[in-house]
Amino acid sequence: MRVVAPDQAKRVVGDHLFGRSSPDVETVRCAVLRSCLWSLTRRRHPVHILRLMNLAFEIVVGEANPDDIEQRRSELRSALEALADVGDAVALRDGRWLPAPTSFVTLGGDANHGLLVGGVPSTELPLRVRELITHRGPYRGVDASVVVPLGIPTVGVTIWVGAVDDALDEWATAVLGVELSKYEEVNDGQTLKVYAPAHAQPRAIQERRWSSPSELQDGRFLALRERVYGAREYRVVEVRNKRVVKSGAVLLAGEARRIMYAVDRQVGNPVMATVERAPDAAIVTLWSMLPRSEFRLFGALGEQLVNPEERSYPWRWQFSERMYPHALARLRGLGIEVSGD
């Protein structure tokens, strides 16, 4: 056995996992989790998250300071969720996971440029292919000419993103019009709020567009109740005589934010985004969170910038001149008013 220095070992691992050296920490976490999931499941037998995380922890962390273990596990769990958001991993019932089917996703109207999406690790690909993939966190950029000859199917970005902007108003009307049941007040100390952009200041951020049912006329609204530890539940409710009288089931993840943008557009009170031009790039700043589909797409088209002092908002994205028009089209599809373009 030959002992090598730590820096040399990192270079060897980087070359093996990515076809290049010096990947960032988030990219390493995602690559290791992808490889562990592929190995443990043999592509068809679901693995429990504890077994998956334990193996990935040994590889990425090894011997950690006891005070850091929970933080490191949290970082790995966030990386796994990022893989699920991108479409590389699939969460099943009872805490079990599988690799997602692999495909090539076209981006930005360029049929040859896109993402490698799915559970296959880069290490399973030929070295000549691996060397041409660019890694950034959970995203793997590549050209169609590199992966399609391997028999990997191609899908369009709309299918991958899963967005419904082409019929946003109709979709939101259908969701708000579902059959509701009699509302039973829950005495948990939490206040039910309803989304009412028609009663908010012009261009107010979405977090400031919530009202009490007692302030509104009769109608149907998106409602929010905050649970313990900050968990949020969104439902459709019906208000009559200043009180909630009917309520629907908890909405699926991502639906509530899309409804907010649809209602903003319907009442003529859009939120704002600003654009700053930089050499060969555009920086977009948003003070309201994007729906999950657009958030996924923006992560692929551009780069999310870090805010000073580690603040969680505003959300800032930098796009190349080639990708910016596609991001702009998504913003306008949500009814967002863009300033500075």
Image (cartoon, rainbow, N blue to C red):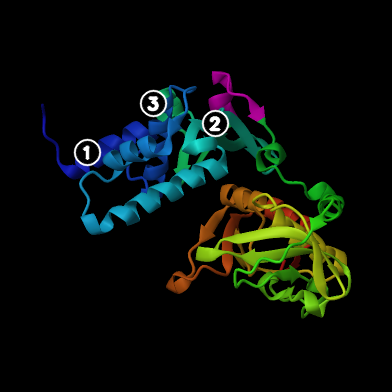
Q: What stretch is highlighted in magenta?
A: 144-154
| Relative side of 179 to 133, left or right | right
Identify the image quadrant of residue 232.
Answer: bottom right
Identify the image quadrant of residue 101.
Answer: top right
Counting other residues with Cα less than 10 Å from the Cα at mark 2, is it few (<14), some (14-19), or many (20 or more)? many
Label 2, label 1: how far apart the Cα atoms are: 30 Å
Image disc number at residue 100 = 2
Spot occupied by residue 29 in the image (x, y as percentages of width and height): 38, 44
* Mark found first going from the N terminus, 3 or 2: 3
Task: Kindly state the secondary structure of the residue where label 2 is placed.
Answer: loop
Q: Where 109 sits versus 270, above or below?
A: above
Spot occupied by residue 112 in the image (x, y as percentages of width and height): 63, 33
Q: Where 195 sits versus 255, above or below?
A: below
Task: Kindly state the secondary structure of the residue where label 1 is placed.
Answer: helix
Q: Residue at x 32, y 54 (%)?
A: 70
Instruction: Provide the major secondary structure of the magenta segment.
Output: helix
Total count of labels = 3
- Mark 3 touching mark 1, by CB under 8 A? no
Q: Which amino acid does label 2 sit on?
A: Ala
| Relative side of 340 to 79, left or right | right
Residue 151, magenta (yes or no):
yes
Q: What residue type is labelled 1?
A: Ala
Q: Name the residue under label 3.
A: 39
Residue 178, magenta (yes or no):
no
* Mark found first going from the N terminus, 3 or 1: 1
Q: Name the residue under label 1.
A: 9
